[in-house]
Amino acid sequence: MNRASFAAGCFWDVEARFRALPGVLATAVGFAGGHAADPTYEEVCAGGTGHAEVVLIEYDPAVTGYDALLDAFWDLLPPGAPAGRGQYRAVIFAHDDAQQAAAQASVQAQRRRVAIEPFGDFWPAEDEHQQFREKQAGGRLSMP
């Protein structure tokens, strides 16, 4: 199994989108790209930690490749939308050199300004934020 991580706005919706993809085995929402250790949701929302809201994805590359995950990431960002700021900024977090190269090629092909950062520390959000959209839908997830 492989891992990938993306920030593309509110992690509740980003997680729901990725969980709906074939080959995605597990997801976790949390925070990355900041400077404070083990931040809370409230601390990140207040803006002082520098973290983005991130979805960590575990996927089966035999079913869904990294390029398909990149395509889903771009679907979450409307064309012409700014890369964002603060906790809702758009970031591709590369877990290895292959993801870094694929992300760079994808950004160039999209002709968009999106940050690519190495994956580092990931701090899981509190339990109530995990699979939030599924919990709100009573365990059912319907994505457009």
Image: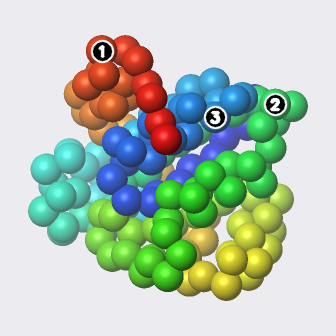
Compare residues 84 and 100 and report the one nearer the observer.
84
Instruction: Measure how far apart labels 2 and 1 are at the Cα level.
Output: 27 Å
Q: Which of marks 3 and 1 is nearer the N terminus?
A: 3
Do the CB atoms of the residues marked 2 and 1 lie less than 8 Å apart? no
Instruction: Indicate the position of residue 80 as horizontal and vertical percent values.
Output: 49, 82
Residue under label 1, please give it. Answer: 138
Instruction: Identify the residue at image location x=53%, y=75%.
Output: 79
- Residue type at numbered disc 1: Gly
Above-or-below relation of 23 to 119: above
Is 140 situated left or right of 36 in this image? right
Instruction: Identify the residue at image location x=74%, y=70%.
Output: 106
Is 135 situated left or right of 121 in this image? left
Instruction: Indicate the position of residue 124 as horizontal and vertical percent values.
Output: 37, 38
Instruction: Indicate the position of residue 21 as horizontal and vertical percent values.
Output: 64, 34
- Residue type at numbered disc 2: Val
Secondary structure found at label 1? loop
Above-or-below relation of 91 to 25: below
Instruction: Measure how far apart labels 3 and 1 are at the Cα level.
Output: 19 Å
Q: Residue 21 carries which label?
A: 3
Q: Earlier in the sequence, mark 2 or mark 3?
A: 3
Instruction: Identify the residue at image location x=57%, y=50%.
Output: 5
Secondary structure found at label 3? loop
Residue under label 2, please give it. Answer: 63
Is 103 situated left or right of 78 in this image? right
Secondary structure found at label 2? loop
Say whether residue 30 is visible. Answer: no
Q: In which quarter of the image is residue 115?
A: bottom right
